Image (cartoon, helix red, strand yellow):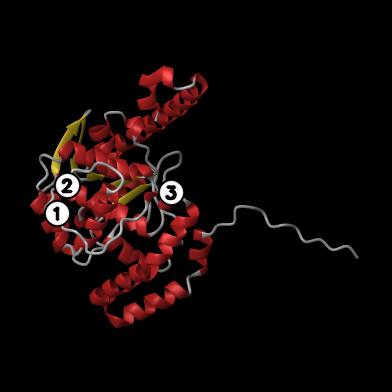
């Protein structure tokens, strides 16, 4: 906000502009620390001959925004090939990262999450957590079939003395849209996920191969989800999409205002909860069979004590119990 309003000083009260400037400077300092952390990760991976694809904010902050302070990050996302996962885990351990115990509902759920998405987060004291992804389309019906395509179409980037890979424009656009969709139906939203898509669309619309984009979405079995997000964004913002793009019949765009409201966002999550769970269980059944599916359902209904303590930590000391005879 400060970035845009600073050019209209006469239209903004001085005290408000100062408050915005202070926040901007704080964010700029945080972003500088984050970029230093990313640079160290990328350089160390390059030294160990581990190719990495930077995802989301780590890949977009400089390329799309030209000002790292405009794109905050809560974690650092990277994509690795399956064969490089052991080496990446050793590298992160050598750099001081660690994984917390008890975060998953079970080892099987952790394995599924790792295979379809990312490993449990790697934490660093005074740094952002790192998520090491094995597959960014793993939650889609046919997501496993496109893992190799991500690497075959990735672009090598050389900047500020570092070397890494960035997804092709088609894969990157699809990843951002599906990521936003998953959070929309879960009732959670960060505004910069929307601006990532809008800025990417503005920068690459003329060069993006739209037939290839929609073909990939169809191959993943995610065309309706992508069309849903596109329709929602077009209802609120200027989004350049070819008129020939698929449309979901009788689909109503999700209200972004409702997602920004904690009460209404909860209702959005509840309205999609059952269908999302059924889709998840169907994929587990298809890939792992009936026995694992039933066991998984029981573990979801009866989570472990360690998982509950990790997810709902006690943030205050219990009140002392006293007795006066």
Whether residue 101 is visible here, answered yes or no, is: no
The mark that comes first in sequence, 2 or 3, is 2
Q: Residue at x 32, y 82 (%)?
A: 291
Q: Residue at x 38, y 20 (%)?
A: 8
Helix, strand or loop at mark 2? loop
Of residues 126 and 29, the one nearer the viewer is 29
Mark 1 and mark 3: span between their CA atoms?
Answer: 28 Å
Query: For mark 1, does the 10 Å Cα neighbourhood hold few (<14), some (14 to 19), or many (20 or more) residues?
Result: few
- Give the quarter of the image for residue 61: top left
Residue 57 in the image, given as x and y percentages of width and height: 30, 41
- Residue that badge 2 annotates: 241
Residue 257 in the image, given as x and y percentages of width and height: 41, 49
Of residues 289 and 272, the one nearer the viewer is 272
- Residue that badge 3 annotates: 260
Query: For mark 2, does the 10 Å Cα neighbourhood hold few (<14), some (14 to 19), or many (20 or more) residues?
Result: few
- Give the quarter of the image for residue 12: top left
- Give the quarter of the image for residue 32: top left
Residue 190 in the image, given as x and y percentages of width and height: 38, 46
- Most extreme residue toward the top is 10
Mark 2 and mark 3: span between their CA atoms?
Answer: 25 Å
Whether residue 83 is visible here, answered yes or no, is: yes
Q: Is residue 31 above or below residue 129?
A: above
Residue 162 in the image, given as x and y percentages of width and height: 22, 33
Helix, strand or loop at mark 3? helix
* Left or right, 95 with reference to 175: right
The mark that comes first in sequence, 1 or 3, is 1
Q: Are marks 2 and 1 in contact (CB under 8 Å)?
A: yes
State the mark number for residue 245: 1
Of residues 207 and 307, the one nearer the viewer is 207
- Most extreme residue toward the bottom is 291
């Amino acid at each position: 906000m400060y970035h845009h309003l600073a050019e209209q000083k006469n239209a903004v009260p001085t005290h408000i502009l100062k408050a915005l400037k202070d926040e901007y400077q704080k964010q700029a300092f945080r972003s500088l620390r984050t970029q230093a952390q990313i640079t160290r990760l990328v350089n160390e991976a390059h030294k160990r001959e581990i190719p990495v694809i930077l995802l989301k904010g780590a890949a977009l902050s400089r390329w799309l925004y030209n000002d790292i302070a405009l794109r905050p990050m809560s974690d650092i996302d990277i994509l690795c090939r399956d064969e490089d996962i052991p080496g990446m885990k050793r590298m992160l351990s050598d750099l001081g990262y660690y994984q917390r115990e008890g975060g998953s509902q079970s080892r099987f759920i952790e394995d599924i999450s790792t295979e379809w998405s990312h490993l449990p987060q790697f934490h660093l004291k005074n740094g952002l957590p790192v998520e090491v992804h094995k597959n960014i389309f793993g939650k889609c019906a046919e997501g496993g079939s496109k893992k190799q395509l991500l690497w075959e179409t990735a672009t090598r980037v050389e900047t500020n003395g570092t070397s890494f890979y960035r997804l092709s424009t088609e894969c990157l656009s699809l990843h951002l849209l599906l990521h936003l969709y998953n959070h929309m139906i879960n009732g959670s939203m960060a505004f910069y996920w929307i601006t990532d898509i809008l800025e990417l669309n503005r920068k690459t619309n003329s060069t993006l191969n739209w037939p290839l984009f929609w073909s990939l979405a169809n191959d993943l079995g995610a065309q309706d989800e992508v069309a849903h997000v596109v329709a929602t964004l077009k209802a609120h913002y200027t989004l350049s999409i070819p008129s020939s793009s698929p449309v979901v019949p009788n689909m109503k765009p999700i209200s972004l205002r409702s997602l920004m409201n904690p009460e209404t966002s909860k209702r959005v999550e509840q309205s999609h909860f059952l269908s999302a769970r059924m889709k998840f269980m169907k994929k587990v059944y298809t890939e792992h069979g009936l026995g694992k599916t039933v066991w998984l359902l029981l573990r979801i209904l009866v989570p472990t004590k360690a998982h509950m303590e990790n997810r709902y930590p006690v943030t205050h000391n219990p009140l002392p119990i006293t007795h006066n005879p």
